[in-house]
Amino acid sequence: MKIAVVGLGHIGLPLAVQYAGRGHEVVGCDTAAWIVDAINRGESPHDDEQALIDRVPQLVADGRLRATTDDVEGVRGAEAVVVIVPVVVDSQRQIDFGPIDAATRDIAAGLQPGTLVIYETTLPVGTTRDRFGPMLEAGSGLTLDRDLFLAFSPERVLVGRVFRDLRRYPKIVGGTSAKSTRRATDFYRAVLEEGTEVRAVASAETAEMTKLAETTYRDLNIAYANELARYAARRGIDVLEVIESANSQPYSHIHQPGVGVGGHCIPVYPHFLFNDAPELRLPPIAREINEEMAGWTVDRIEEAVGSLVDQPVLILGIAYRGDVREDAFSTAFRLRDELAAAGARVYAHDPYFDDEHLRRLGFEPYDLDAPQPVKVAILQAAHERYRGLDPAALPGVKLFLDGRNALESEPFAAAGIRYLGVGHGG
């Protein structure tokens, strides 16, 4: 097949590589010229996954993969188009369809009769059919489900392990008609590894809601874990032992508490589900609980060490999770604001970001190789770099707050540093 992948970010480029690796001819489209130029030189613009770095050069050299900034040109002649352009939200979590609308209009201009278009970007229920269907029809002159076929199939992978997740998880597919569903199902069977389950569902709306349901479930579960952690901390109980014991019963699957939830997915996609659905009561409460965790953490720090006015506090890791070079909606930003409101001087360190990036985000860079005294250190992202952290590398520290419950407390106790986790420690 000739396939166009529109959006070559941390998920889109691995998808393009997966399809090209199965013998198809793939054109990747992206508005970022530096991404397109890197790919056409035979280099991966993303370094999240070694398989990506290894496979791009050969696929480009073999003519199986190329890239362009011209969506219309990239789509023209494609038998299938996969769209993975981000839908972003503003600081108030209001949805901005601007980039994906623009991409959809460009795609429509390049469509030929019989083309299959699949959206993998997470979307509010009904968006594929009700928003993008009419846009594609209007821009192409084609008729939906007659000479233009449309489906939704949610991406269900994590950055850094995309190829592994593509093999492990069923591919959920729902179209705007039975024929569109069938076309999309056949497509994924042709581009994914043999043996990967491709599961057709009743409609595009079913597939859209599937992604929102599974993401929101995680947010709800983490919120419950955080509620338990706060209660356990007040009662002097180790919540990690509670959760481990509870999960020994096969119907209990409690997640882990933490200082907050970040990333493109969990803090964002629940809003796609409940922003315009007042009948949904639990998801907004869960969001509120998880957003409060940074403030609760700073309150605990002040209870332990007193006032933070003019005191230096170090945040270890500004990435939204361990060992990724991505800080979208990171809890580090809420910690920064809560600490600043408490009067602290906020420092940050992250092996994945340089000092200039940290300064742009409102942090004072901290050098672990030439450390200066700080009163409190907070582990926000559990990077591998921090796993073997020597407490002596943090001069002056009175309290270490492990926001991910990732480190052992004994080395800190031996160094005379108080250790607190989220829901355990004392």
Image (cartoon, rainbow, N blue to C red):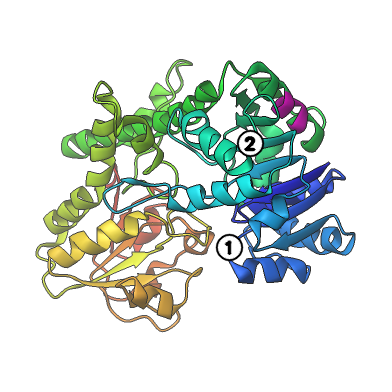
Find numbered disc 1 in the image and state the secondary structure of the residue it sits on: loop
Residue at the disc numbered 2: 118
What is the x, y in percent for residue 234? 16, 38
Residue type (three-letter) at the residue carrying disc 1: Thr
Can the viewer see residue 280?
Answer: yes
Q: Is residue 291 highlighted in magenta?
A: no
Q: Mark 1 points at which residue?
A: 31
Q: Which residue is drawn at 59% across and 23% down?
A: 176
Q: Is residue 149 above or below residue 248?
A: below
Residue type marked 2: Ile
- Residues 287 and 204: in front is 204
Residue farthest right in this picture = 62
Q: Give the range drawn in magenta.
A: 183-187
In the image, 117 versus 225, the foreground residue is: 117
Is 343 placed above or below 319 here? below
By secondary structure, the bulk of the magenta-drawn segment is best described as helix
Quick one: SS at disc 2? strand
Q: Which of 229 and 155 is in front in this view?
A: 155
Quadrant occupied by the N terminus: top right
Q: Residue at x 22, y 38 (%)?
A: 230
Q: Viewed as shown, does residue 387 lie left or right of 178?
A: left
Tell me residue 403's x, y (percent): 34, 52
Q: Considering depth in this image, is 111 or 421 the residue closer to the camera?
A: 111
User: In the shown orientation, is residue 222 left or right of residue 130?
Assistant: left
